[in-house]
Amino acid sequence: MRALCASFVLATVVLAACDPPETPAAKAPSRDEVIAAGEALPDPVARTVHHLRDIAQNGGYRELARFAGETPDFRSNNAGLSDREYWSLKERTGDFPAEQVGRVLSYPYTIVSTPQGRVYIWPALAMVRGSEITPAEARDIDRLLGQGQADELRRGAVWPGYVLGIREDGQWLYFVSGSG
């Protein structure tokens, strides 16, 4: 019992200490800086999305970690752990990373120009500045994150949900939570 309690405390401390990495999603651009996402995904991005959806349906955190490991400088909230260790910990707490990847990719995306090129970001709602949230977006945010979250974002809270970014060349850049 003591070991179980110690494991729970360690898991709680590790999860609470996770600082979101610096990513293109770290600072929401203004609406003028976001490129409309009505266009079709470029083939390299579409292949990465297809691979991630396949992992979400047929794999788990190990396959996500293997794929993330193929990307130099891939970022997650791993808090000093390997992505595999971190996502294993998340799974043991009931937050299944592969399932979350599939869920995030089911929402509309947006595109942001960065020094690395264009980055495709899911969900698009994560990139809306709190001060620019429209009533329709507020309804969608509350449906996605829970009642009252749009108001929290308007007051300056960080986006509490997951955000996934893929560069236009198909490189999976990040999968983070709480990356407002």
Image (cartoon, grey):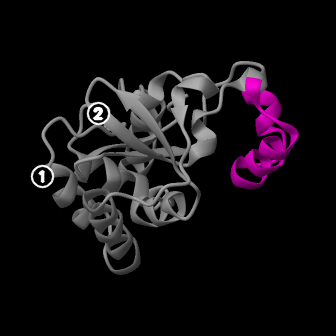
* Residue 173 visible (yes or no): yes
Amino acid at circle 1: Glu
Placement of 127 over or under 39, stated as above or below:
above
Residue positioned 28% across, 23% down in the render: 115
Task: Please name which of the two marks, 1 or 2, marks the residue nearer to the observer.
Answer: 2
Placement of 128 over or under 27, stated as above or below:
below
Q: Position of residue 121 (x, y in %)?
A: 46, 44
Q: Position of residue 9 (x, y in %)?
A: 45, 39
Query: What mark, if any, has residue 70 been given in the picture?
Result: 1
Placement of 113 over or under 69, stated as above or below:
above
* Residue 18 visible (yes or no): no
Amino acid at circle 2: Gly
Location of residue 113 (image quadrant): top left
Q: Position of residue 155 (x, y in %)?
A: 77, 19
Location of residue 117 (image quadrant): top left
Residue positioned 84% across, 46% down in the render: 136
Residue positioned 33% across, 53% down in the render: 87
Secondary element type, mark 2: strand
Residue furthest to the front in view is 39
Q: State the extent of the magenta-drawn residues as a range.
A: 132-153
Q: Which residue is mark 2?
A: 117
Secondary element type, mark 1: loop
Quarter that holds the N terminus: bottom left
Image side of residue 146 versus residue 125, left or right: right
